[in-house]
Amino acid sequence: AHTTHTHASTRHQELLCIFGTGDLGRSLGQRLLQTGYRVVYGSRRPHSCGLLPQGAQVRSHAAAAEPASLVFICIHREHYDFLETLAPHFKGKVLVDVSNNLKKNLYPEANAEYLQRLIPGAHVVKGFNTLSAWALQNGPSDANRQVYLCGNSAEAKEAVAEVATKLGFTVLDKGSLSSARELEDFPLQLFPEWRLPLRLAFGLTVFFFFYLLIRTVVSAYVEQGKDISFRIMASLANKVFPIVSLIMLSLCYLPGVIAAFLQLYRGTKYKRFPDWLDRWMLCRKQLGLLALGFASLHVLYTLIIPIRYYVRYRLNHTIPFDTTMAWRTDSYYAMGILGFGLYLLLGITSLPSVSNALSWREFSFIQSKLGYLTLFICTFHTYLYGWDKFLWVSGYTWYTPPGYMLSLVLPSAVMLLKLLLVLPCVDRSLTRIRQGWERSDPEDDSKNSLLT
């Protein structure tokens, strides 16, 4: 036991070298020192390299690299040339390339591959490049706790993985050094999963804003000479946001319905979905979160408007009290509140810290069963808003339907298609397919009909 403790202590006090005294180099050195490693910096100017973590040594590049078995290269690629002169000092050592570029395809080869070509006697590992100096200083968090590694030497990657694990990070091995380009491009991505949902949300918002602007403000000015442009700031916005929110929520569940019908049609789950459907399904979380954002704006805008029919009645006694109207408006707002509450539940459970604490069955129940319930309640909320307005000829300004009617098309279609899928005969067939059953002879409907 004493021998094991001594060995662990010796490994823990291992000397690590860092080339580069910038923000990342200093933050990495500080974390390594806090973890128990000894740290030596290699610098061109050992005596004037600025403030470094207390307890770290500073030497010339050659003197710093000599006693260390693992060297972090925290310098930019354009300064790599001098490393070639130090090749004899790097022989057999592990070099961790943490560099990134300012944009993609800036060089013909990845930085790590270039470093390996400069120093063929070393074992280059690409890693730690997806972490910021802030993340290194403050330790791992839910959003930034993974360290990606790639390299041609399994032993070298194991040594780097040991360091990353002791720092509290989770290590993901991405294979050989040929994957370095992918790792270097990773920090340059700007919300890749959000691009399609954001474009869709922007397009829907712009379309419905101008659609409702023409129907309300422009038509009132053209036909009656009234200037009601003040409605743009609150009333118009409070119509656009719920419309976009309901459509975006529908778009979260529509791809799942399409995928189910596609599996029924094919009679198997082992054929890939079309690329467009794959991409659509992968961005459902982002679509849902944007829908929640628009719903939240709708709630905030509604709070500034006197909303209850009864309140308007109390303020204006010239309007006769209508019990049916009171029931309708209170039911409408009650459905809105329930729908928004379920919206929030869906959004909260999509957070990694929450979803990681749920079993797959629990997560699936919330996101699927309660998700469809949310869509139903929000759709019902909109139907209550419309009530009998679809019968009013005056509501079809310039022969165009009201905005709420357009917003109901997609969610109503999704709910109808989902209703077909939960029919016992269809659900039984779909369950068999998802359990691995395949239709061997699709031509023989009498023997292999999916709907029996």
Image: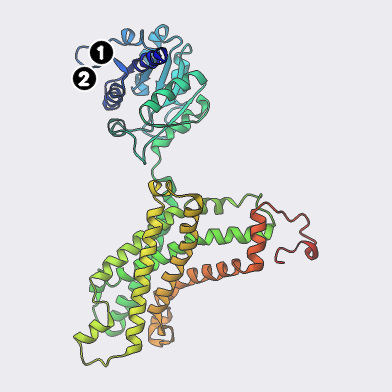
- For the N terminus, the quadrant is top left
The residue that label 2 is drawn on is 54
In the rendering, at what x and y percent does residue 235 appear?
A: 28, 73
Left or right of residue 169: residue 415: right
Is residue 202 in sight in this rendering? no
Image quadrant in which you'd find residue 36: top left
Q: Which label lies toward us, 2 or 1?
A: 2
Is residue 270 in sight in this rendering? yes
Report crowding for label 2: few under 14, some 14 to 19, many 20 or more residues within 10 A (C-alpha): few
Please give the name of the residue rendered at 36% of the width and 65% of the height, measured from the top-left corner: 340
In the rendering, at what x and y percent does residue 22 appear?
A: 27, 24
Please give the name of the residue rendered at 60% of the width and 52% of the height, measured from the top-left corner: 274
* Marker disc for residue 58: 1
Q: Nearer the viewer, residue 222 or 18?
A: 18
In the rendering, at what x and y percent does residue 329 appear?
A: 33, 80
Q: Nearer the viewer, residue 300 or 110?
A: 300
